[in-house]
Amino acid sequence: MRLFGTNGIREVVGDRLTPEFATRFATAVATICPVGPPIALGWDGRTASPALARIVSGTLVLMGHRVVELGILPTPAIQWSVPRVGAQLGIIITASHNPPEFDGFKCIAADGLEATRETEIRLEQAMSAPPPRSAPFDRLGSSRHDEGGAARYLEGILERVDAPTIVARHFVVVLDCANGASAVTSPELLRRLGCQVVTLNGHIDGTFPGRPSEPTEANLTHLARTVPAVGADLGIAHDGDADRAAFVDATGRFVPGEKILALLARDRLRRGRGGVIVTPVTGSRAVEDLARELGGQVVYTRVGSPSVTHAMQERSALFGGEENGGLIFPELHLARDGAMTAAAVLDLLAHEGRPLAESLAGLPSYTMVKLKLPLPTDRREELLTGLTRALAAPGAEIVALDGVKSVRPDGWVLVRPSGTEPLLRVFAEAKEPARAQALAEEGRRAVEVALAGLV
């Protein structure tokens, strides 16, 4: 049975995610990892995460392993720490942006990258096998707490931006921590960059009382009101594990993630005088336009940070990321990083000397529409076959890299099953907003036709 989606295992607590499931997962990790180098363990602020951490840590110790407990940290901070504590593997207990009833597990390789699919397959096989016996009393492992993760991570970011220039701008920033793990790092980062910080949802609470965890426009209305109300230069919002960042300009207008991706891609291409940009099939054509103009190249992958980061490693990419705000800066590490994204945007604005809205105004103009539809069937392959037929059109190119993408001369539409939730996601993009909306509706109708064909 496949347990890992595009970004780890995510399940509902008390449903599939039980103490027994957590024990089987930890036992599987202990089985595939040799006893010797430690295993790092960190978690987010979700309600179940500390308890799941105790189960995982205790199981690993009983199986003879040494555990370095990093505590509550953002996902990218844990990834940053894994190689720096000499771990052979890292485990992150998180469900990222999912609703509060979810939690889950991500595995990080010794170099800080997300584990490969091959490692996930080994874990899935080990979870299905009979559990091995625990170590005898005289060969038990040990656990220790590491308190340096946040400081190490912040120093890494500060060393990779022009901090003095940012400090000299005295930015006023409204920061929405989403009651998540960024509360232990991002406010301090912005203060050290000389910002006056107004914090929203700045205490950790796994029920997400302030707003839903995902930093979408609909969920950031409080941030959008607060930024102009306090005269801030911009607003920054994270998701629950802070591997993403979303932005609001000084007028309170939400900035779509694909525009921040394009903005920073342009900045990196200019600095690097070309280079490779990696983005999934959901990436905007604006990045292609900029790459052509600035001597770069765009490489497309499947959706999910593991696909993007491993392609970036293979191509020695300059920059990469997803349109949802999960951006990757290889000068720091190959991980989606919300805090580094915030620092990079401040660095760009400090050097350009103009507001965020003006920096965005020079980008190629596209509109992207996103829809979420229920996924009432597990017959995904049959569904995708039906979508391929439904999205065919004269002059269209069908791309089946991930889901079904129908590329037209004046835009594109993509339908793919979510790898983290029981949903179908529809993406559509065109220069004209009305055309983008029409393509999204075409995607919705294609889903209806494909589902009808399965009945």
Image (cartoon, rainbow, N blue to C red):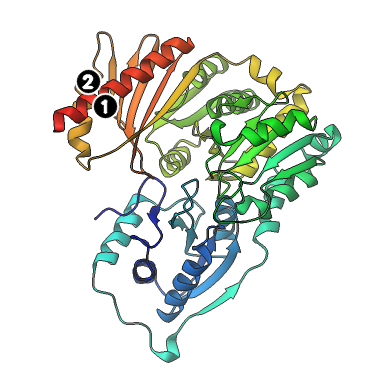
Q: Give the residue at x 67% y 57%.
A: 150
Asked if 356 appears above or below 95 in the picture, the reply is above
**Does residue 117 appear to the left or right of 258 in the view shown?**
left
Pick the front one: 347 or 234: 234
For the residues labelled 1 and 2, the Cα–Cα distance comes to 8 Å
In which quadrant will I find the C terminus? top left
Residue 383 x %, y %: 21, 33
Q: Is residue 260 left or right of residue 198?
A: left
Label 2 sits on residue: 390
| Residue at 62% over, 33% down | 221
Crowd rating for badge 2 (residues with CA inside 10 Å; few <14, some 14–19, many 20+): some
Horizontal arrangement in the rendering, residue 258 relative to residue 56 (left or right): right
First in sequence: mark 1 or mark 2?
2
Residue 406 in sight: no
The residue sitting at the front extreme is 209
Residue name at image x 27 percent, y 9 percent: 395
Looking at the image, can residue 118 be seen?
yes
The kind of residue on which mark 1 rests is: Val
Residue designated by label 1: 447
In the foreground, 414 or 251: 251
Q: Position of residue 171 (x, y in %)?
A: 80, 34
Q: Is residue 437 left or right of residue 320?
A: left
